[in-house]
Image (spheres, rainbow, N blue to C red):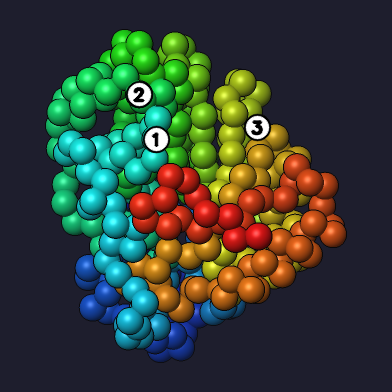
Amino acid sequence: MADAVRSADELMEMLDLPKGGLALNIRECESFPLLVPRGFVTRMEPGDAHDPLLRQVLPLAAEEEPSQRVSADPLHESDAVIAPGLLKKYPGRVLLLTTNACAMHCRHCFRRCRSEAVGDWQPALEAIAADDTLHEIILSGGDPLCCDDEALAGLAERLSAVRHLQRLRIHSRLPVAIPERVTDALIDWLTDTRLTPILVLQVNHPREIDDPCAEALRRLVRSGIPVLNQSVLLRGVNDSDETLADLCERLIDLGVLPYYLHQLDRVRGAVHFEVPEREGQALIQALRGRLPGYAVPRYVREVPGQTGKTPLL
C-alpha cells in the first residue's frame, strides 16, 4: 500500500497513455484521491484509455456531472448508526466500520464521501454485547484487512466472547487488489475463531483475477472459509453478458460463489457508472441462458429502510 500509485500522471505514464488524452478531475482527486496498487495496474491494458480496470480507479471529469438523483449518503447509513462506527441496517446483524483505509479508491464506492475517522472499537463492542438479537457481525470500512492481523485477531477474540454471536463476515477487496495480503497469519486467525468466518469480495471484471489473485483465493477456499463475491454493475466495466459470464465462471472455478450483482448506489460522483435496471435485468436473463443456476448472481439494489436487499428480477 505504501508503494501504491497516487498520481494520475504516473498512472498515465505507466500505461503509455497521453496525459492530456483524458479529462482528469483534479478537484475530485483532492477530496477522493487516486489510489491504486501497482500490481493492480499491471492487469490493465497499456494504451487503452477505456480499460475496464483503469475506469474503476481513474478520476474523470464525468464525476462532476450534476444530478438530482445522487447523494453523499445514498443508503442513509447515518440513520443506522447505533454506536460510533457501528451500523444496524438489518435484523440480526450489525456492521462495524473498522477503518477508513482502503487498498485502492474505487470511483463507484458508495462510501467515497465519508470523512469521519473510525475511533475506538470499545463502544461498538459494548453495544454488540448488549443486544442478544444479533447473530452476525460484519467487518467493513474502508477495508478491514487494511488493519494488521494482530489487531484483527484480537478483535475476533473479543467478538467470539459474545455468546450470541455466531458468524464473522468480512467484506474486503484486498485479496484482489493486493493478493499478498492473504498470509498464513490471516488464515490462522480466521480459522481459529469460534465464530464461523465468511469472506465477501468485490470482483467486477474477470481480468482482476490474475495468477497471484487466483492463488490467494484458492488458499482461502482450501482453508475451509466460505468465499462469496458481490459485483457492482458498472457502465463501461462489466455491462455485457460476455464479461459477466466470464467473471462468474472464473469465480466458480476457484470455488468462489457469485453472490450478488448490485445495482449502483447513487453516490455523488459516480452517476456516470449507472446502468439502467432494464439493461441489468436483460443481462441476468442472458446469464441464465449461458450458465448453470449456481453461477448466476442475484441482481439486487439496496433500498434504505428495507430489511434486506431488494431483488430486481
N-terminal of the pair, mark 2 or mark 3, is 2
- Residue 300: numbered disc: none
N-terminal of the pair, mark 1 or mark 2, is 1
N-terminal of the pair, mark 1 or mark 3, is 1
Q: Which residue is mark 2?
A: 133
In the figure, residue 307 lies in which quadrant?
A: top left
Residue 309 visible to an observer of this rendering: yes
152 in relation to 248, above or below: above
Q: Is disc 1 surrounded by few (<14), some (14 to 19) or many (20+) residues within 10 Å?
A: few
Residue 122: x and y in percent read 16, 25
- Disc 2 is placed on an element classified as loop
- Disc 1 is placed on an element classified as loop
Looking at the image, residue 206 sits to the left or right of residue 103; the answer is right
Q: Nearer the viewer, mark 1 or mark 3?
A: 1
Which residue is at a point 39% across and 35% down the rendered structure image?
Answer: 91
Q: Nearer the viewer, residue 44 or 192?
A: 192
Instruction: Give the amino acid type for the residue marked by disc 3 in the picture.
Output: Arg
Residue 145 visible to an observer of this rendering: no
- Residue 218: numbered disc: 3
- Residue 91: numbered disc: 1
Task: Give the Cα separation between the discs numbered 1 and 3.
Answer: 32 Å
Pointers 1 and 2 in contact (CB under 8 A)?
yes
